[in-house]
Amino acid sequence: MEATTITREDGIAEAVASFQAGVRREESFRRIVDSFYHPIKGYFARRVFSSEEGLELTQETFLRIYKGLDGFRGEAQFRSWAFRIAHTTYLQWLERRYLPALRAGELASPGTGGEQEEPPPDVVSAQTPLEVVLKKEVRQKLGEAVEALPEQERKCMILRVYHDLSHQEVADFLGLRPGTVKAHLHHAREKLRARLGGMFGGIDV
């Protein structure tokens, strides 16, 4: 295993050196892509919402690696350098997807006056008028309770519950430690349960 790792690292170092020297640059970069494509694609597959988004971010990462490769000086292992680029690409994707709405106050919880996705017609028709009113009332009360949380707890709750980000993704997005995110969610959950009782019981954070 160790010999294989050393050989692989030597091969990457050789490919980087050839690229930087202008010797068969495209061939050298192809060797780098072949070595890191699946690990980087897997990194995004665990974090984004569709294979298309994962593929786009993988391609964007390798484009950034290509553009930055002449400036790589070997202060860190190439693998670490490449994955830092992937992580930066991922964080910027999170910002593009969510940050403008969060700053504008539009990343709101359902039931607080924001634009909501309507349920399918067959679902609506299967509900009695009383059921429709009650569900709307529950959403409204839950949304109002979430909006009343302290800012960081509210942001963590909205990103985690309504936008289905993992604890790590919420932490990356807000610049917090995962443990801090979990603490905010715990406090938010306790406050919501105290305010809403069983209405909040089925929501997992």
Image (cartoon, grey):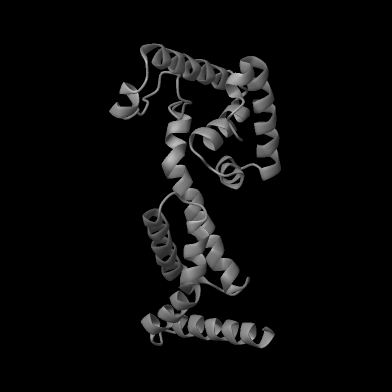
Q: Position of residue 26 (x, y in %)?
A: 37, 81
**Residue at 62% across, 26% down:** 201
Please state which of residues 103 and 164 is positioned toward the viewer in this rendering. 164
Give the answer, above or below, for where 47 lies relative to 32.
above
Q: Is residue 60 left or right of residue 186?
A: left
Identify the image quadrant of residue 21. Answer: bottom left
Give the answer, above or below, for where 103 lies relative to 172.
above
Please state which of residues 76 and 91 is positioned toward the viewer in this rendering. 91
**Residue at 65% across, 38% down:** 181
Quick one: quadrant of the N terminus? bottom right
Q: Position of residue 29 (x, y in %)?
A: 42, 78
Look at the image and tell me whether residue 125 can be seen.
yes
Q: Position of residue 171 (x, y in %)?
A: 61, 43
Q: Is residue 124 left or right of residue 167?
A: left
**Residue at 45% across, 20% down:** 111
Q: Position of residue 203 (x, y in %)?
A: 58, 30
Identify the image quadrant of residue 161. Answer: top right
Identify the image quadrant of residue 76. Answer: bottom right
Please state which of residues 24 and 195 is positioned toward the viewer in this rendering. 195
Quick one: quadrant of the C terminus? top right
The total of numbered circles placed on residues is: 0
Give the answer, above or below, for where 128 lies relative to 164.
above
Q: Is residue 203 left or right of residue 136?
A: right
Look at the image and tell me whether residue 177 can be seen.
no
